[in-house]
Image: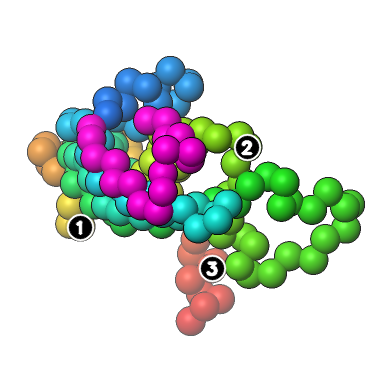
Amino acid sequence: MVVRLSEIEDILVVKGEMDTERFLEAGDSELKAATPVSYELTVRKFDDSVTIEGPVTLDAVLECSRCLDEFTVPLSLNMAVKLAPKSKLSHSPEMELHSDDLDVYYYEGDEIDLDPFIYDEIMLNIPVRPLCREECKGICPRCGKNMNSDPCNCHEAPSSLLGEKLKSFLN
Protein backbone atom coordinates (compact mmCIF):
# COMPACT_ATOMS: atom_id res chain seq x y z
CA MET A 1 0.00 0.00 0.00
CA VAL A 2 1.57 3.26 -1.12
CA VAL A 3 0.53 6.56 0.46
CA ARG A 4 1.14 9.91 -1.25
CA LEU A 5 2.03 12.61 1.25
CA SER A 6 0.86 15.41 -1.04
CA GLU A 7 -2.69 14.01 -0.84
CA ILE A 8 -2.78 14.11 2.98
CA GLU A 9 -3.83 17.33 4.66
CA ASP A 10 -3.61 16.22 8.29
CA ILE A 11 -4.93 12.68 8.75
CA LEU A 12 -5.57 9.73 6.44
CA VAL A 13 -7.09 6.42 7.59
CA VAL A 14 -5.96 3.43 5.54
CA LYS A 15 -7.97 0.21 5.95
CA GLY A 16 -7.54 -3.07 4.21
CA GLU A 17 -6.20 -6.58 3.94
CA MET A 18 -3.15 -7.93 2.22
CA ASP A 19 -1.93 -11.38 1.41
CA THR A 20 1.39 -12.57 2.86
CA GLU A 21 2.42 -13.92 -0.57
CA ARG A 22 3.89 -10.47 -1.12
CA PHE A 23 6.35 -11.09 1.71
CA LEU A 24 7.30 -14.56 0.47
CA GLU A 25 8.54 -13.06 -2.78
CA ALA A 26 11.25 -11.36 -0.74
CA GLY A 27 12.64 -14.81 0.09
CA ASP A 28 11.19 -15.10 3.57
CA SER A 29 9.95 -18.58 4.32
CA GLU A 30 9.40 -17.94 8.04
CA LEU A 31 6.07 -16.14 7.71
CA LYS A 32 3.06 -18.29 6.92
CA ALA A 33 -0.42 -17.00 7.54
CA ALA A 34 -3.78 -18.73 7.82
CA THR A 35 -5.60 -15.44 7.22
CA PRO A 36 -4.73 -12.25 5.33
CA VAL A 37 -3.11 -9.41 7.26
CA SER A 38 -5.78 -6.84 8.23
CA TYR A 39 -4.90 -3.32 9.17
CA GLU A 40 -6.51 0.01 9.99
CA LEU A 41 -3.73 2.57 10.06
CA THR A 42 -3.95 6.27 10.77
CA VAL A 43 -1.34 8.30 8.88
CA ARG A 44 -0.76 11.73 10.42
CA LYS A 45 1.33 14.43 8.78
CA PHE A 46 2.97 17.22 10.81
CA ASP A 47 4.97 19.54 8.54
CA ASP A 48 7.39 17.00 7.02
CA SER A 49 7.25 14.34 9.74
CA VAL A 50 4.75 11.48 9.54
CA THR A 51 3.37 9.00 12.08
CA ILE A 52 1.67 5.72 11.25
CA GLU A 53 -0.40 4.12 14.01
CA GLY A 54 -3.05 1.45 14.27
CA PRO A 55 -3.92 -2.20 14.76
CA VAL A 56 -2.56 -5.01 12.59
CA THR A 57 -3.97 -8.54 12.93
CA LEU A 58 -3.44 -11.96 11.37
CA ASP A 59 -3.47 -15.66 12.21
CA ALA A 60 0.12 -16.85 11.83
CA VAL A 61 1.07 -20.48 11.24
CA LEU A 62 4.12 -21.27 13.37
CA GLU A 63 6.20 -24.37 14.05
CA CYS A 64 6.45 -25.48 17.68
CA SER A 65 10.03 -25.31 18.89
CA ARG A 66 9.59 -28.49 20.99
CA CYS A 67 7.54 -30.93 18.88
CA LEU A 68 7.93 -29.32 15.40
CA ASP A 69 4.16 -29.48 14.74
CA GLU A 70 2.55 -26.52 12.99
CA PHE A 71 -0.08 -24.54 14.89
CA THR A 72 -2.01 -21.33 14.35
CA VAL A 73 -1.73 -18.37 16.70
CA PRO A 74 -3.64 -15.09 16.42
CA LEU A 75 -1.36 -12.04 16.36
CA SER A 76 -2.88 -8.71 17.27
CA LEU A 77 -0.45 -5.85 17.46
CA ASN A 78 -0.49 -2.10 17.54
CA MET A 79 1.82 -0.45 15.04
CA ALA A 80 3.45 2.90 15.85
CA VAL A 81 6.04 4.26 13.41
CA LYS A 82 7.59 7.73 13.17
CA LEU A 83 9.01 8.95 9.86
CA ALA A 84 11.14 11.95 9.01
CA PRO A 85 12.46 13.14 5.64
CA LYS A 86 15.86 11.77 4.70
CA SER A 87 17.08 15.34 4.23
CA LYS A 88 16.97 15.76 8.04
CA LEU A 89 19.40 12.87 8.45
CA SER A 90 22.87 14.12 9.29
CA HIS A 91 25.57 13.18 6.77
CA SER A 92 28.48 13.78 9.12
CA PRO A 93 30.64 10.72 9.89
CA GLU A 94 30.27 11.27 13.63
CA MET A 95 26.84 11.84 15.07
CA GLU A 96 25.50 11.55 18.59
CA LEU A 97 22.35 9.47 18.78
CA HIS A 98 19.65 10.06 21.34
CA SER A 99 17.03 7.51 22.39
CA ASP A 100 14.39 9.33 20.31
CA ASP A 101 16.53 8.97 17.18
CA LEU A 102 16.43 5.16 17.35
CA ASP A 103 12.66 5.06 16.82
CA VAL A 104 12.62 7.17 13.66
CA TYR A 105 12.61 5.85 10.09
CA TYR A 106 13.45 8.03 7.10
CA TYR A 107 11.68 8.48 3.78
CA GLU A 108 12.47 10.08 0.42
CA GLY A 109 10.12 11.72 -2.01
CA ASP A 110 6.36 12.05 -1.83
CA GLU A 111 5.38 8.37 -1.48
CA ILE A 112 5.63 6.00 1.47
CA ASP A 113 5.14 2.25 1.06
CA LEU A 114 3.41 0.91 4.19
CA ASP A 115 4.01 -2.80 3.43
CA PRO A 116 7.61 -2.98 4.74
CA PHE A 117 6.56 -1.34 8.01
CA ILE A 118 3.68 -3.80 8.44
CA TYR A 119 5.98 -6.72 7.63
CA ASP A 120 8.63 -5.56 10.13
CA GLU A 121 6.02 -5.14 12.85
CA ILE A 122 4.70 -8.67 12.28
CA MET A 123 8.18 -10.22 12.28
CA LEU A 124 9.11 -8.40 15.50
CA ASN A 125 6.04 -9.82 17.24
CA ILE A 126 6.46 -13.47 16.27
CA PRO A 127 7.73 -15.42 19.31
CA VAL A 128 11.36 -16.51 19.12
CA ARG A 129 10.59 -19.97 20.54
CA PRO A 130 6.93 -20.59 19.70
CA LEU A 131 5.12 -23.34 21.62
CA CYS A 132 1.94 -25.09 20.46
CA ARG A 133 0.95 -25.23 24.12
CA GLU A 134 2.74 -24.63 27.39
CA GLU A 135 2.68 -28.30 28.43
CA CYS A 136 4.14 -29.56 25.11
CA LYS A 137 6.33 -32.61 25.79
CA GLY A 138 8.41 -32.28 22.63
CA ILE A 139 10.26 -35.00 20.75
CA CYS A 140 12.02 -38.00 22.33
CA PRO A 141 15.77 -37.43 21.95
CA ARG A 142 16.37 -41.15 21.40
CA CYS A 143 13.67 -42.37 18.99
CA GLY A 144 12.33 -39.06 17.60
CA LYS A 145 8.65 -39.68 18.37
CA ASN A 146 6.36 -36.80 19.19
CA MET A 147 5.69 -37.47 22.88
CA ASN A 148 2.41 -35.49 22.77
CA SER A 149 0.73 -38.03 20.51
CA ASP A 150 2.76 -41.25 20.89
CA PRO A 151 4.33 -42.27 24.18
CA CYS A 152 7.70 -43.81 23.48
CA ASN A 153 9.14 -46.87 25.19
CA CYS A 154 12.66 -45.53 25.42
CA HIS A 155 14.40 -45.82 28.74
CA GLU A 156 15.87 -42.77 30.33
CA ALA A 157 19.28 -42.00 28.86
CA PRO A 158 22.10 -43.31 31.02
CA SER A 159 23.94 -40.56 32.79
CA SER A 160 27.43 -39.91 31.56
CA LEU A 161 30.57 -39.90 33.67
CA LEU A 162 30.86 -36.15 33.10
CA GLY A 163 27.29 -35.65 34.31
CA GLU A 164 27.98 -37.65 37.47
CA LYS A 165 31.11 -35.61 38.21
CA LEU A 166 29.16 -32.38 37.74
CA LYS A 167 26.40 -33.59 40.09
CA SER A 168 28.96 -34.51 42.77
CA PHE A 169 30.70 -31.15 42.34
CA LEU A 170 27.44 -29.21 42.74
CA ASN A 171 26.41 -31.15 45.88
Which class describes the residues within 10 Å of circle 2: few (<14), some (14-19), or many (20+)? few
Question: For this view, does 35 lie left or right of residue 114?
Answer: left
Question: For this view, does 84 lie left or right of residue 167?
Answer: right
Pinpoint residue 36: horizontal percent, then vertical percent: 21, 31
Of tags 1 and 2, the one toward the viewer is: 2
Q: Which residue is mark 1?
A: 134
Name the amino acid, label 1. Glu
Name the amino acid, label 2. Glu
Q: Residue furthest top?
A: 25
The circle on residue 116 is none
Pinpoint residue 119: horizontal percent, then vertical percent: 41, 38
Pinpoint residue 152: horizontal percent, then vertical percent: 17, 39
Q: Are marks 1 and 3 in contact (CB under 8 Å)?
A: no
Name the amino acid, label 3. Leu
Q: Quadrant of the N terminus?
A: top left
The answer for how far apart the CA atoms under marks 1 and 3 are is 29 Å
Q: Which residues are magenta?
A: 1-17
Quadrant of the image occupied by residue 62? top left
Q: Which residue is mark 2?
A: 108
Which class describes the residues within 10 Å of circle 1: few (<14), some (14-19), or many (20+)? few
Quadrant of the image occupied by residue 66? top left
Q: Which residue is mark 3?
A: 166
* Residue in view at x 45 percent, y 35 percent: 4
- Tell which circle, 1 or 2, labels the residue nearer the N-terminal end: 2
Quadrant of the image occupied by residue 115? top left
Tag count: 3
The answer for how far apart the CA atoms under marks 1 and 2 are is 45 Å
In the image, residue 85 lies in the stretch drawn in magenta: no
- Tell which circle, 1 or 3, labels the residue nearer the N-terminal end: 1
- Tell which circle, 3 or 2, labels the residue nearer the N-terminal end: 2
